[in-house]
Amino acid sequence: MNEETIGVTSVQPIQPAAARKHRSGELSFIGFVRKNNALYVMLIPVFLYFITFKYVPLLGSIIAFKDYNIFDGFIKSKWVGFQWFELMYTNPQYVRLVKNTLLISLYQIVFSFPAPIILACLLNEVRQMALKRSVQTVLYLPHFLSWTLVYGLAYMMLSEQSGLVNDMFKGLGLPTFDFLQSPSAFRSVVVSAGIWKEMGWSTIIFLAALSGISPSLYEAAKMDGAGRWKQFQYVTLPGLLPAITILLLLKIGNVMDVGFEQVYIFLSPITYEVGEILDTYAYRLGIMNGQFSITTAIGLFKSVIGFVLLVGANKISKSTTGESLF
C-alpha cells in the first residue's frame, strides 16, 4: 500500500458540515440557524418588541370577562362571564354605534382607498421627473400633520363664522352652511379630511408597485399598437393588482377600526347621532368613566369581527384572483 492510498483511507468518511445535513442534502434546522446566525441575532429585537408590546398586552383581555377593579388587579377581580358583552348587545345605542362605524368604514373603502391608486397612476404618467418629485413632496406633507392641525385647517375653510368657503357663499349672495356642526355633512367632512391627509402618503406603495413593472411590457404593448389607455388597461392595472388586493384585504380586516383620532377631533354633541363610533364611545364610557371591562369587551368584539372578515375575504380573494395574504 503506497502513501497516497494511506492518505485517502485516513480521511474521515463523514465531514462535520455533512453531519448537519439530512440525507436529502438539506441543512437541518440547527445547521441552518448556525449558518445564518447573524440574521437571527438581528431578529431578536423584533421578537422582543412584538412579545412585549403586542402579545403580553393580550393577557389584559381577560378583564372583558371580569368586573375589573384597579385595586384588586387582573387576578383578584371577580369573574362575571359574558356580562359586559350582554350589556353591550342590549344597549339601545349599540346598533347606532355599529351602523356609524360600518358606514364611515364603507365610505373610506369606496372613496379613500381608490384615491391613492388613481393618484399613483396619474403621477406615473408624468414624464418630467422634477415636476413629478415636486408634486409628490407636496402631496406627502399632510401626512405629517396631526389631526388637531387638520381640524384647525378645516375650521378655517369650513367654519360658518369665518370659513373661506362660507365667505365665498356670502360674496355670491348664497346662504351659509355650517359644515362642521351639521349631522348631514359630518361623514363627508371626516372622510374628505382623511383623503386629503393620507392620499399622497399612501401612493408610495402603489408607485413602488408601478416601478416594478418591466418597461419591456410597455414597449411590447406599443409595438402592438396599444395607446395610453390600452397600456394602462393591460399592463399597468395587472401590475398593480397584487398590491391592490393585499391592501384591500388589510383594509377589510380593519373595517371596525375607522380611526379614533380622525373621528373624535371632528365630533361634537350635535353630531353624536351620525358620528359616534365604537372607538369614541369606548373612550367616553371606558376611559373617562373608568369602566375598563366594557371598553375591553368592545375592543375584543372589534377584533373578532375583523378577524372573521379578514379570513373570509382572504379565502374569497384566493379562490377568485389567486392573490391572498396566507
Image (cartoon, grey):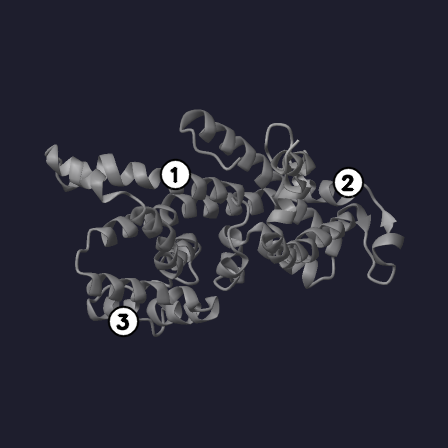
Residue 242: mark in rendering: 1
Cα distance in 3D space between marks 3 and 1: 45 Å
Identified at 40% across, 58% down, the residue is 198
What amino acid is labelled 2 in the image?
Phe
In the foreground, 275 or 160: 275
Per the image, label 3 sits on a secondary structure element best described as: helix
Gap in Å between the C-alphas at discs 1 and 2?
A: 41 Å
Residue type highlighted by circle 3: Asp
Report the Cα–Cα distance between label 2 and label 3: 53 Å
Whether residue 47 sits left or right of residue 133 in the image: it is right
Q: Nearer the viewer, mark 1 or mark 2?
A: 1
Give the vertical position of 33 relative to 160 (above or below). above
Residue at far top of view: 319
Judging depth in this view, the residue of 224 and 44 nearest the camera is 44
Identity of the residue drawn at 47% across and 46% down: 105
- Tell me which corner region of the image, top left, top right, bottom left or bottom right, holds residue 306: top right
Q: Nearer the viewer, mark 3 or mark 1?
A: 1
Residue placed under numbered mark 2 in the picture = 82
Residue at image point 19% right, 40% down: 218
Q: Which residue is mark 3?
A: 167
Does residue 127 appear left or right of residue 242 in this picture? left
Of marks 1 and 2, which one's residue comes earlier in the chain?
A: 2
Mark 2 or mark 3: whose residue is earlier in sequence:
2
Q: Secondary structure at mark 2?
A: loop
Q: Residue 112 in the image: x percent, y percent?
A: 38, 50
